[in-house]
């Protein structure tokens, strides 16, 4: 396996087999087209669906402060018309075959996708490909869509359980790209000129920075052929460009401790307690996933048991780790009545300290492994999930792994490794973000 | 097919084939056990997962006003321990195999489920069966869980886009079981005595009112055998009881027009505009689904085009129909900045009037059919979705239909039928519910 190159090192015009676990089903192949566009597919036998996506390797962390929200704004605009299709024609074609289609922007990438019946895959490639290759970014549509994005920001403001994630990030990562909201702010969205977005489309959506992924009942060569035709003009213009390298590592990322309170007249206090985690490709990743499951990943987890089952203090409480190319954040979310927030935060801190001091029990480790391995297999039944795996590997990893390899990696983690990662990560300085009916100077 | 009885008319101790579309995969069988418990399974070839559920035929509409929320409270308590297992043991067993497990309460039924790897199906049946058959409803746990449910109510209050559904229902159906929230209110939850919940558990969770469903890579006879053993005591006590009949029809249901405004300091106005729909088994159901898709079911729908794409007035706008045994509600949801609410509501009313007057175009009908048929097939790939289909049929329909039959029914709908249902339903009096920063007397 180690002989398989990353896309950037694969000879343009060639196709390589990345995985072939099962003699056909699960076969993952990658073609790098001259001009730097890669097409990665997984053939899955037996189903009737296929998921197709085109992703750009840029997200909100690639923006400067003045243009916060431009990657996401661009994502919206790609639905608004191409050289040959109106917005209505784009959506009518996909809706008309019952496609599950949409797009999303993260801090590190942007993805346009459609899941369809396998017979409709050529249509999905045609429409999604057209959106990405031939957008016109009509000036009138930019102004209409500006209104839609301001609505989206307002909608998000009305969801404090989600919003607290942004409040935490803004405090934890400060005024840096990782600390800024993906949607941008009302001010940056109001000010963002069409020219800036068009520039981003021109510079960031070049073949070398685009990744085509597809999974399901499909034929790799046919997908490649159709993509090659759709992007012919752009590929020709790109000359001998090579695919972008995975986003792995980077300079040190500073994080802040302390507390931030956003005062709002909510019914619950929405709380995030977090500390610095690890980058996605850190070898401790699997141990940390197991730790996070044992601490707050299910109804049998310590936090669920201590906060909800024993004390009845919250409906929602869970722990999770968010990984980036160069850093990460280990977070606990809890929502509770405002008068119970001190107690909830106290219990969470206590459980963090216990795990940092003593790790988890053998029984918890066994259970966490079963939980993650079971969900991994169950979650891999859908073609969209499989397409997402392909994308994740291309974006952020030096090589692809099969589901069986991932299962084995979790199996291999020892209690000692979990204890070690707990001791190191959970004793780092904690930051706290709270949205609730408090004075902004209140401390917890 | 018409010779297949409903469960209530099937001879206890027998097994019937309900569907056999594909010579094996898709085989749906039902066994009615003596004592009135039914077990319905669908065998799906090729996958590695199985979904299992036990459902009670009662929901919040079976409660009186003083005990609003008791069905949902009971649902929570079934996780809190059985004669032989603690809450932690229950969740640890399911978490330990990566089960996607939970429960939910609707207005008309309550379901406990687990989706697992097929090899873990016996464990899922054992644990979920134990929860439903052998709950202890410990008095201390009732008090702890009361706190959790009060937290759940507070959490829901912080999600105005969802909450407006309850505000609408309370106005539209008034002070009736359909008008009351599933969670109950702070007052009813604080007052609900353990004895009332225990009584509900005793009376509503009898074998004749329980439905066992399972779908995936499974063996019907083995599922039946395991369920029979787990419920042996209850089945013996139930004597010659027969399964409950599907919930279909009922007396007339009154609905209100007019407006209700809930004043809140939100960033968006959250709006529902709705009118009386049809019951689930109404022959116009398929025409109404197509109408609803064309009006507000996707990015190419009229409302999305008029409100969002052309005018940029909202991020979220969609139409949907909620069906009950005896009535329904056809609703439009939109979220927009408060100063735009009048315009958004005006556009929605205008589109409703246009469709009521002229129906939809042939192109819209064709697209709506493709959309619903495509999603139906795509959505049926998961074993949990297939289990949900089985349950829906047993709860609310005189017979089971295959996915191919459903596809054909949508195919058969004519433009004339859609126009007819639009003319009749969309000219009914409209009710409006708004959550936003307004005086409660404001009109729209």
Image (cartoon, coloured by chain):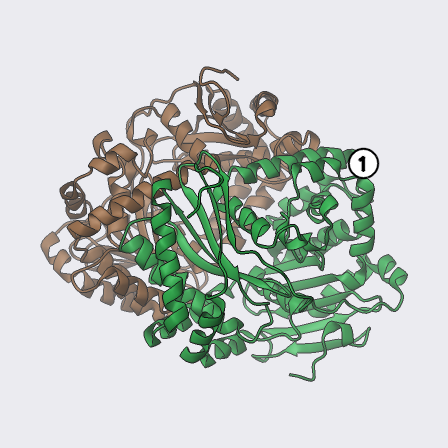
Chain colours: A green, B brown
Point out residue B144 in the picture as x, y percentages from the top left corner.
24, 49
| A410, A269: nearer the viewer | A269
Find numbered disc 1 in the image and state the secondary structure of the residue it sits on.
helix
Determine if residue A80 is in view: yes
Question: In the rendered view, would you say A170 is above or below B16?
Answer: above
Quadrant location, the N terminus of chain A: bottom right
Seen at 77% across and 72% down, the residue is: A8
Q: Position of residue B312 (x, y in %)?
A: 67, 32
Horizontally, is B25 left or right of B207 in the view? right
Vertical placement of residue B98 versus A168, above or below: below
- Which quadrant of the structure image shows residue A366? bottom left
Q: Nearer the viewer, residue B132 or B429?
A: B132
Label 1 environment density (alpha carbons within 10 Å; few <14, some 14–19, many ≥20): few
Task: Provide the residue designation for mark 1.
Answer: A139
Chain on which label 1 sits: A
Residue at 84%, 69% in the rendered image: A34
For this view, does A49 lie left or right of residue B11?
right
Q: Is residue A188 above or below residue A3?
A: above
Residue A27 picture location, percent across and down: 62, 75
Which residue does the image show at 46% across and 62% down from the upper left? B22
Position of residue A390 in the picture relative to residue B125 (left or right): right
Q: Looking at the rendering, which quadrant does residue B353 occupy?
A: top right
The count of marks equals 1
Q: Is residue B278 visible?
A: no
Q: Which is nearer the eye, A270 or B73? A: A270
Residue B233, percent from left and from top:
12, 60
């Amino acid at each position: 396996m180690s002989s398989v190159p990353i896309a950037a090192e694969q000879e343009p015009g060639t196709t390589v087999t990345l995985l072939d676990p099962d003699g056909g089903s699960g076969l993952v192949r990658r073609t790098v087209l001259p001009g730097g566009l890669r097409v990665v597919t997984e053939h899955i036998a037996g189903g009737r669906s296929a998921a197709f996506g085109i992703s750009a390797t840029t997200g909100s962390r690639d923006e400067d402060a003045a243009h916060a929200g431009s990657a996401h704004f661009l994502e919206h605009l790609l639905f608004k018309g191409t050289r040959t299709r109106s917005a209505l024609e784009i959506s009518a074609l996909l809706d008309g075959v019952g496609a599950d289609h949409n797009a999303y922007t993260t801090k590190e990438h942007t993805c346009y996708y459609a899941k369809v019946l396998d017979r409709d895959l050529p249509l999905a490639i045609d429409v999604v490909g057209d959106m990405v290759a031939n957008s016109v970014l009509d000036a009138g549509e930019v102004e209409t869509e500006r209104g839609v994005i301001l609505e989206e920001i307002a909608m998000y403001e009305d969801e404090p359980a989600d919003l607290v994630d942004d409040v935490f990030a803004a405090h934890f990562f400060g005024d840096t790209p990782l600390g800024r909201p993906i949607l941008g702010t009302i001010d940056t969205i109001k000010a963002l000129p069409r020219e800036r977005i068009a520039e981003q489309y021109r510079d960031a959506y070049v073949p070398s920075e685009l990744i085509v992924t597809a999974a399901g009942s499909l034929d790799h060569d046919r997908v490649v052929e159709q993509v090659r035709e759709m992007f012919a003009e752009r590929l020709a213009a790109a000359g001998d460009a090579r695919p972008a390298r995975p986003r792995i590592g980077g300079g040190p990322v500073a994080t802040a401790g302390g507390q931030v309170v956003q005062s709002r007249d909510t019914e619950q206090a929405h709380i995030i307690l977090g500390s610095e985690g690890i980058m996605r490709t850190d070898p401790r990743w699997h141990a940390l996933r197991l730790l996070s499951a044992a601490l707050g990943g299910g109804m049998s987890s310590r936090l669920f048991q201590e906060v909800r089952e024993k004390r009845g203090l919250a409906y929602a409480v869970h722990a999770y780790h968010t990984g980036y190319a160069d850093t990460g954040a280990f977070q606990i979310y809890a929502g509770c009545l405002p008068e119970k927030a001190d107690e909830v935060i106290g219990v969470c801190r206590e459980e963090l300290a216990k795990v940092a001091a003593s790790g988890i029990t053998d029984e918890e480790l066994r259970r966490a492994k079963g939980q993650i391995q079971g969900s991994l297999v169950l979650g891999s039944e859908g073609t969209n999930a499989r397409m997402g795996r392909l994308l994740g590997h291309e974006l952020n990893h030096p090589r692809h792994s099969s589901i069986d390899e991932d299962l084995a990696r979790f199996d291999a983690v020892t209690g000692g490794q979990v204890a070690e990662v707990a001791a190191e990560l959970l004793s780092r300085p904690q930051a706290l973000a709270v949205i609730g009916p408090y004075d902004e100077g209140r401390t917890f």
